[in-house]
Amino acid sequence: MHSNIFLIILGMGLVTYIPRMLPLTLFHRIELPPFWRGVLRNVPYATLGALIIPGIFLIQDDPWFGIFGFTSAVVASWLGVNITGVVLISVLVLTVYTTV
């Protein structure tokens, strides 16, 4: 039983690793046009928006919590802050909001 679990974990790791490794090894010398670089640069922000925006509409206790968090994330990303900074700024704004 333990060897089956190990093989399952190993298989899942390979299935996850291969699609991430192949583009880096096969296409590392190809330079993308500026349009596609811009598209790929904005994927983390679009993903973050797709994860956060539905949650804003589901807050029942304090809708301002969602509004302040969303607004701070939009402003930070509009100013060009990287994705980690956007998340940290939103968390900081919401921490200040809940303690005031």
Image (cartoon, grey):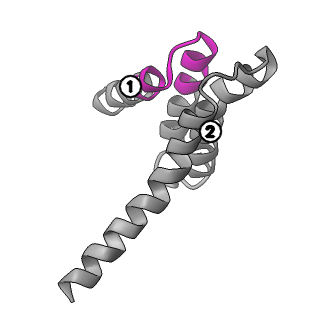
* Above-or-below relation of 84 to 16: above
Quick check: 88 left or right of 34? left
Residue beneath label 1, please?
Answer: 88
* Residue type indicated by callout 1: Leu
Give residue 100's position: percent from left, percent from top: 31, 26
Q: Quadrant of residue 13?
A: bottom left
Residue beneath label 2, please?
Answer: 49
Give residue 59's position: percent from left, percent from top: 52, 52
Give residue 36's position: percent from left, percent from top: 77, 25
Residue at 54%, 17% (x, y): give it: 76
Magenta residues span 72-88
Magenta: main secondary structure = helix
For this orientation, the residue located farthest to the left is: 2
Local SS, label 2? helix
* Above-or-below relation of 25 to 76: below
Q: Pick whichever of labels 2 and 1 is earlier in the sequence.
A: 2
Residue at 47%, 38% (x, y): give it: 65
Picture quarter with the N terminus? bottom left
